[in-house]
Image: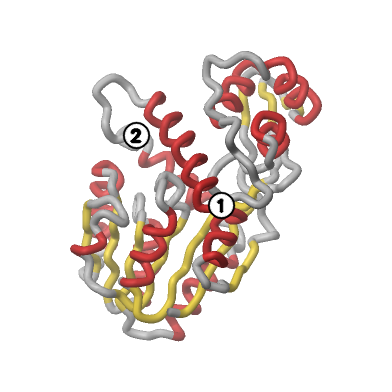
Amino acid sequence: MGEFQATGTNWTTLWSQLARVGNTRRKLKLENGQADRWHKNVEQFNLRVYERWEQRDTSRQFVQKTLEDFPDSNVLDVGAGSGTWTLMMSPLAKSVTALDSSPAMLDFCKKEVENAGFDNVDIVAGIWPEIAAQVPEHDITLCSHAMYGCTDPVAFLKAMIEKTRKRIILLLRAPSQDGVMAQAAMLVWGHPYDSPNFQIAFQILLDMGIFPNVIMENEHLWKQWRNKSLEEALAELKGRLGLFEDQQYDQRLMHLLVENLVREGEEWVWPADIRTALVWWDV
């Protein structure tokens, strides 16, 4: 990890390196023989989304306004997951293509669509951008928190551009530059980027000659992480940084956690320091 450099770096390379760390972490968490990490967690994921949506959400309002401004649009939902965005967009769109790589997510999405009675949704299994050649052009393309595992962000974005006639909308996590994970990344890597996120994606878009609009969700931060012990929190932090069995930073990382986490009952609570950034541009 010592090759990470944030200042003057190639932002695409930085994204790719961080995506590989995240992919390794997710693979290690899979059970033996398990291929789909969502096979037991779809309903929990779906509930978390709707819990967030109980609050005012400028991102959701913007997507709704876009579909009102572009009536009878065909919409591509890249990384549709459990189908929350697909279900929201279907009544406002001519058609929606819900694309995801997880069989468990797509099965859940299909059932939700059927239960809602929508007949304008096409369910597609595949990994973006590998499957892009098989997908027709759409008027609007939405990708909500679904490109973090892609190690080639430029190919991901170019494929979206090629398949979009009117507008592209990206939702990305925007962690604080002085949050716990940012401080941990600075300690280990010398820069504050703990994972692929809005800040890096924005720089990549600029390098591609795209000057996007940004709407920052400032009213509501993401739900705080919780751990049963500081040791569990340390393991979580190390896993996110790809340290795993590496113990050379343990003492300093534990000090960082002690300084920033708060004890609430039987749990240690992380500060709320992540928000959503909506990035959009017209093609």
Give the residue drawn at x 43%, y 59%.
154
Q: Which mark is residue 37?
A: 2
Q: Quadrant of the N terminus?
A: top right
Horizontal placement of 193 versus 16: left or right?
right
Q: Nearer the viewer, mark 2 or mark 1?
A: 1
Which is more toward the observer, 10 or 244?
Answer: 10
Confirm or deny contact between disc 2 and disc 1 (CB under 8 A): no
Query: Looking at the image, is 280 positioned above or below residue 219?
Result: below
Query: Looking at the image, is 222 positioned above or below residue 129?
Result: above
Q: Secondary structure at mark 1?
A: loop
How was this image coloured? secondary structure
- Which callout, 2 or 1, points at the residue further toward the start of the chain? 1
Residue flagged by tag 2: what amino acid is it? Arg
Tag 1 residue: 10
CA–CA distance in space, label 2 to label 1: 30 Å
Residue flagged by tag 1: what amino acid is it? Asn
Q: Give the class, few, some or many, for how many residues have Cα within 10 Å of label 2's Cα (few <14, many ≥20).
A: some
Q: Which mark is residue 107?
A: none
Q: Position of residue 89 (x, y in %)?
A: 38, 69
Residue 105 at least partly seen: yes
Give the residue drawn at x 62%, y 14%.
247
Q: Quadrant of the C terminus?
A: bottom left
Horizontal placement of 261 versus 281: left or right?
right
Return the residue found at the far right: 259
Give the residue drawn at x 61%, y 69%.
214
Query: Looking at the image, is 271 positioned above or below residue 257?
Result: below
What is the quadrant of residue 113 in the picture?
Answer: bottom left
Give the residue drawn at x 57%, y 67%.
206
Which is more toward the observer, 156 or 259?
Answer: 156
